[in-house]
Amino acid sequence: MTADFFHDRLAPYGCNPADTRGRLAAEPESPTRSCYQRDRDRIVHSGAFRRLKHKTQVFVYHEGDYYRTRLTHSLEVAQIARSISRTLGLNEDLAEAVALAHDLGHTPFGHAGEEALNVCMEPFGGFAHNDQTLRILTRLERRYAEFDGLNLTWEALEGVVKHNGPLLPPPGSPLPPGLRLPTTIAGFQDVWDLELHTNPGAEAQVAALADDIAYNNHDIDDGLRAGLFGVDEVAELPLVGPIVRDVADRYPGLDRSRLIHETVRRMINAMVVDLMTETRRRLAEHRPGSAAEVRALPLPVVCFSDAMLEAQRPLRAFLRQRMYRHYRVNREMSKCKRVVHALFQLFMDEPNTLPTEWQRDIATGGGDTDLVVRARHVADYIAGMTDRYALAEHDRLFDLHVKT
């Protein structure tokens, strides 16, 4: 596609494919797709993306088919990000690529699995899902003949790594105490500078807040349908209450399922409208003339209003207490953490129990360096598991009655 095609549709502060910083491994671009469309397509066709289908969001996969998984969540984030980007004159394809890739590095069993794997990996550099996403995108996906990873553009990788903001303070500023770049990000930074001290482009900022919009609202939906709390309880929250009452007044006698959906739909709309209004105000104030100027601003240009940020705090506190820490969820997550710990310890002690293809690259000499390499390799294997594969692997390894 020609540069003029995108130039006519993009605001000056959007990421134009004609201005891309390219790919780490040089390759001819597609004659029919922009570089960012190609990034998106490579993510969709990756094995890591397919595995999100059976990775949990909050509930373990066997809890029920209705609840959201990492895959359905990523698709919902991408839809919101694309809609916002289109309205703001940003590059929809880049925003969608970042949205679709942002959860690729998540372990099985959601945040509980990540916490457990991070504890296991603490002596070996720790584990963080955003760092693991970069490992997948640059190393672990092995599909192409000429390079490891997906060889995404600089803008897509920058957006994924920095979608929640800068990782380093401005040059010349002291590092905050205890700040340590995750292992893969630190190593990749030596190869290709992602400018970790700046904000990402506006498309990545949109993807990050689309993530917030999606999980806040859809966790309410899942929590209500799971019976972890009731409509009358969320109706006490400042952001949700007025919408619940308006729906109930407008549609008296509406059945519970439709009431929930109508409420969540309107909440998503309210947050999207607020985000676009505040973002337009900031764009008018700062008048960035390019994507580079967006990155150079001291604060994000894409943001909610102060009033919306304040309204979200009790909502997040409510979900944290009534959903993420609900005893039913805690019990499942406790079991899942034990599965992750047990798998990690066994594979570290007996790496010959790993599948053959995972044994080839593992270090077995026993020195400190070899142990770090082995631990990272084991973490890669476990992090790539789906919920059901991790549970089945645990059964195969620890239940004498299950065939291996």
Image (cartoon, rainbow, N blue to C red):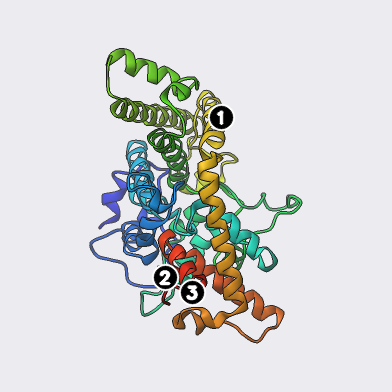
Kindly report the distance in space between the C-alpha atoms of the residues bearing marks 2 and 3: 33 Å
Along the viewing direction, whichever of 353 and 78 lies nearer the viewer: 353
Crowd class of label 3 (few under 14; some 14 to 19; many from 20; radius 10 Å): few
Left or right: residue 228 compared with residue 367: left
Residue 399, placed above or below residue 71? below
Residue 92 point in image, percent of width and height: 34, 47
Picture coordinates of residue 344, whole percent (x, y): 58, 69
| Sooner in the amino-acid sequence: mark 2 or mark 3 | 2
Residue placed farthest to the bottom in the image?
Answer: 365
Q: Position of residue 302 (x, y in %)?
A: 48, 37
Q: Marks 3 and 1: CB-CB under 8 Å?
A: no
Image quarter for residue 378?
bottom right
Q: Earlier in the sequence, mark 1 or mark 2?
A: 2
Quadrant in which the N terminus appears: bottom left
Residue type of the residue flagged with mark 3: Leu
Q: Residue at x 46, y 25 (%)?
A: 234
In this rendering, position of residue 119 left or right of residue 280: right
Looking at the image, residue 224 lies above or below residue 298: above
Q: Which residue is mark 3?
A: 400
Residue beneath the point at 56% across and 40% down:
325
What residue does disc 2 label?
A: 141
